[in-house]
Image: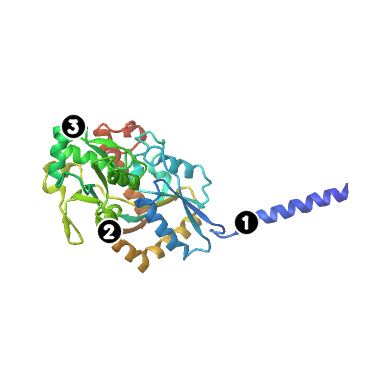
Amino acid sequence: MRRTFLKLATAAAVALSAGSYASAQEYPFRDITTAVVWGAGGGTDTINRMIMAEMEKHLPVGISVINQTGGVAGSNGMVYVMNQPDDGYTLVGLSESNVTAAVQGGWDKKFSFWHPFIVGGSPDLISVPADSPYNTIEDLVNAAKEKPGTIPAAASGSGSIHHLNLLAIENGSGAKFKFVPYKGSAPGQEAAIAGEVDLVVTSLAEQAPLIEGGKLKPLAMLTPEDAKFGDVTIPSAFNSFDGLDKYLPLKQAIGFAVHASAPDDAKAALTDAFNKAIASDVVAEWAKSNNYDISGKSGAEASAIFSKLESTFAWTLWELGAAKVDPATLDIAKP
């Protein structure tokens, strides 16, 4: 009996010691996973794979990137990460479009659930297949006015910034398109090239290779300024429709987040690696060559930006009749 008791006591002491050792280890002591809520090849996926590769250089562990798509406004990926331990070892790769998940009925939490990091973003534009009969934004809008709701348009998922920009161009110009949702920017762009839809609204960064390759024809930027792309000037849609300034511009904020309830040491380690990665020549060159503007904000600054986006996007969708849940019931303040 005494021998058995000693064995049990020794085993308990070893287990306690191992547990204490694990808890005493500095974060991170094992690999990190980032679950991107949008599809592979899109802007959020591309940015996360780039920034995680740079952050790895300043951490003692690796970071793997996976895709958890589907749901409403990226809700499947957010729910997946939400259900993981809040220990800092599972991050969510997201964008400004995710702030509409709650009013779209995808989940029941405000965006303050997350502690975000913003890498940057790229302006949206409207493009059509290279062989499209539409050569100007006026051509496209006039055709949509003649046959309301019949011209299919891809703009990523419902509630995404691209979808909101499509709604904005409709309301600002008086046109009505047939919105066709896709699980990210890349599938929507592929659908345009394949002739499944007549136009696509995504970012300049995402469309750039397809425009350069002659597969997409840009019609208009959804920003107040024209854009210079190689030898081509892409005109602003603001030049053609006076009503757009009521709804636009809407700006991207792409990056990642950890649970707001994650340990302070995890947030500090991630912030340090993030800041070092953002300051690197690699990120600067990548942004320049891929038509992105770098933000580099995290923590309270990034949270303030997402709070404003959540307010703007949620109430815009509600007022346009495109939301399922009243933002007021979620305590989302009006902008």
Of 62 and 111, the residue lying toward us: 62
Q: Amino acid at mark 1?
A: Ala
User: 50 above or below 140?
Assistant: below
> Nearer the observer, disc 2 or disc 1?
2
Question: What residue is disc 3 on?
Answer: 148
Nearest to N terminus: mark 2 or mark 1: 1
Labels 3 and 2: the sequence-earlier one: 3
The residue that label 2 is drawn on is 291
Q: Could you give the CA–CA distance between mark 3 and mark 2, rounded to whole angstroms?
A: 33 Å
Q: Is residue 234 left or right of residue 294?
A: left
Snapshot quadrant of residue 157: top left
Q: Earlier in the sequence, mark 1 or mark 3?
A: 1
- Could you say whether the residue bearing mark 2 is in a helix, strand or loop? loop
**Residue drawn 47% across the image and 65% down it:** 58
Point out residue 300 in the picture as x, y percentages from the top left corner. 37, 53
Estimate the x, y position of residue 155 in percent, counting from the top left.
Answer: 29, 42
Q: Residue at x 46, y 58 (%)?
A: 270
Residue matched to label 1 = 22
Reply above or below: 230 against 248: below
Q: Is residue 7 above or below residue 155?
A: below
Q: Nearer the viewer, mark 1 or mark 3?
A: 3
Residue at the image position 48 percent from the left and 45 percent from the top: 81
